[in-house]
Image: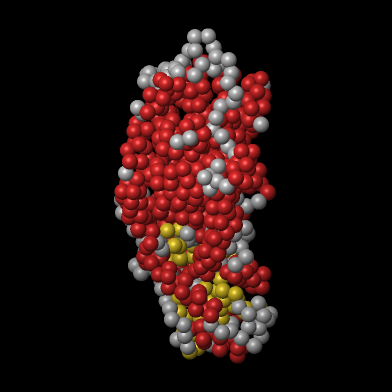
Amino acid sequence: MLDRLAGFVVRKRLAVLVVGLLLAVVGGVASTTLFDKLTAGGFDDPKSESSRAITALDDRFGQGLPNLTLLVTSKGGVDDPSVTAAGTELTRKLGREPGVANVSSYWTTGKAPQLRGKSGHKALIMGTVTGDDTSSQKRVAALADRYEGSRDGLEVKFGGYTKFQRELLEQGQKDATTGETVAIPITLVALVFIFGSAVAAALPLAVALVAMMLTMGLTWILASVTTVGSLAASVVTLLGLGLAIDYSLLMVSRYREELRSGLTPQDAIRATLTSAGRTVTFSALTVAVSSLAMAWFPLQAVRSMGYAGALTALLSGASSLIVLPALLALLGDRIEKGRVFRRRRPATAATGPEAAGRSVESGFWHRLATTVMRRPVPIVTIVTAFLLLLGAPFLGINLGMPDERVMPASSSARQVADTVRAEFDSSEQNALQVVAPEGGGDRAAVGAYAQRLSELPHVAAVRTATGAYAEGRQAAPPDQRYARFASGDAVYFSVVPESASPDDADDADRLVGEIRSTKAPFETLVGGAAATNHDAAAALEKWLPYALGTVLLTMLVLLFLVTGSVMLPFLALVLSALSLTATFGALVWVFQDGHLAGLFGDFTPTGNIAATIPVMLFGLAFGLAMDYQVFLLSRMREEYELTGSPTAAVAQGLERTGRIVTAAAVAISVVFLAFTVSGISLVKAYGVGLPLAVLMDATLIRGAVLPAAMRLGGRATWWAPAALRRLHDRYGLREEPAAPAPRRDGDRALTG
């Protein structure tokens, strides 16, 4: 199939390039409005109890969770008569806005102390912006434009969850542009150094831009028919640049290698597609499957990033297999134009098998592999112990869900949230809602249940239709203030925790469990921010085995097709997991514990890691790690079939792929590291974790542990039963060129 594709692309190269360019332009134009279709939400399980509680609260009581907070500051103090009048008028005016409900403030609730700052100069206005995530985010942006700033002697600043979502979306768009601006020129310089030719260096970037614009266009279509999270755009940019450059590096290097061996440009393209092209195909499938495994999780943010990762991998592979060969066919020998400096010829440039053999055996990677294989046991022991030591902090991981602290200090939502935590009793704003869709007509049962809830540890008060309760006693009788807690036969309870400090996330999580285990006289649904986070973490834990099983099983099949071995796929999985262990340990050490935080820009260590980070990093980093295993093992398989020696296969396979795989690892790491400039700590974590995983795999794993482990395995490393050998003979990947083609006169060898 790839041989036929090569013939088609060479014959129709101009048509392929024109169509590819037009599609990329269309995708690029669509991407200009992509962020209008994305949402910053999706960190909840829509089928969980907490989500059903929110739905019931809206359907039966016409109320939503408070998601809008206005911080009002006055130099004259919030109890000044003129400030009271202005604050009351602002509250009423905001309450009359369409799409805004349940607006209350310090001045309209009888000067409730929890809505007044400690200094007496700040007060809060609370409300709910109705509608889905997309419409509510647009509405809060419009409201902020009209109300924020100085008005009637008051300084008004918008915050709350919906404002946080909107700013997360806007910051993500800004970061994607900044990341590209930083990554592209640095990567171009690195590619010029790798290839030594400006023309050859420009090809991977050209393919990467085409792949990114195509993926953005398809993501735009996907966002038009379903909900797609805003972080998906970061995945497209981050992974699109990296993968397309990786695949193009492999293809361009193999093409130049075939030219140096004397093939014509057309035959070199055919040889490249039938060898390196197969590796790219399997690699793209590897990353796509790892990403698609995220579809098991019900959190829309995780699913969106998984879909984006799969689309990016497949389109990066397709661009490298179609657009890049068309460019190569157009350039021919001119790929060496723009020569910046000349290198010593690589091993494969030597003429004659004996010369080639001597060159290969004198190379750095060959010498390294040989040295490692002389002392496999101590090297495996030392490197494994070192990686496990790096991964040790992962044992102390604390999982949470992202809040305003993932934003930069300039974020309005972040500033409001920080002020509320520092100067207000924010427990009221973090109350849990316990909804009883049926049974509210029995007021005695309602009161008895509220009394039991108020006796729970860490509960400050419970409010419901029968009044307020604290410490197992009724603290206030029912009056007009509590009428909103009942609607027909439905009733709900507001359970106020004792503390709402961000450091008390464990107490909040524990309280959710205690409420749900408290016996109720009717069916109840527990909702609220803490319940949503509890259910999201539970969903990730529940579906993690399914995602892992999907990834591992698929990887075993794909790696068998690459190697034809039973043992090597399992070995590759273990080694990839080992490199990820070090990566996760570093993430905990930096982003949870705050070590070296200043090295990666302005972010706030929160004492926990967003639960979505290790899940997504596993999917993306594991796919990338296996990507390099495919590159390496496919070439080792070719050498093993040529030599029949397991040690020679390792040493020569590593030598022939060492430089290019190292170059690919460096290039993709440069791209990922560029995203540490992001203002969102979630994106910073990906910008640190992904290159760390790639570099660990490309150096310690590939250069030390893999050769040592394969030396210990010997010929058993390549063993497979007869039935599986026949299966591999028919369907397996072989990293070998097409049938020999006529050489050009003079056997011109191009330096590179």
Residue 480 sits in quarter: bottom right
Q: How many marks?
A: 0
How are the colours assigned in the image? Answer: secondary structure
**Residue 326 placement, left or right of 113:** right
Q: Note whether residue 712 is visible.
A: yes
Is residue 177 placed above or below 386 in the rendered structure? above
Is residue 110 placed above or below 625 in the rendered structure? below
Closer-to-camera residue (290/733): 733
Quadrant in which the N terminus appears: top right
The image position of residue 513, as x and y in percent, is 50, 75
Furthest residue to the top? Answer: 745
**Residue 560 placement, left or right of 663:** right
User: Measuring 54% from the left and 56% from the top, which residue is drawn there?
Assistant: 548
Q: Note whether residue 107 is visible.
A: no
**Residue 2 placement, left or right of 242:** right
The image position of residue 688, as x and y in percent, is 40, 46
Is residue 12 placed above or below 704 in the rendered structure? above
Is residue 298 placed above or below 719 in the rendered structure? below
The image position of residue 114, as x and y in percent, is 43, 72
Quadrant in which the C terminus appears: top left
User: Measuring 40% from the left and 53% from the top, which residue is drawn there?
Assistant: 581
The image position of residue 48, as x and y in percent, is 60, 67
User: Measuring 56% from the left and 34% from the top, which residue is drawn there?
Assistant: 734
Closer-to-camera residue (37/645): 645
User: Measuring 49% from the left and 22% from the top, which residue is drawn there?
Assistant: 256
Closer-to-camera residue (680/235): 235
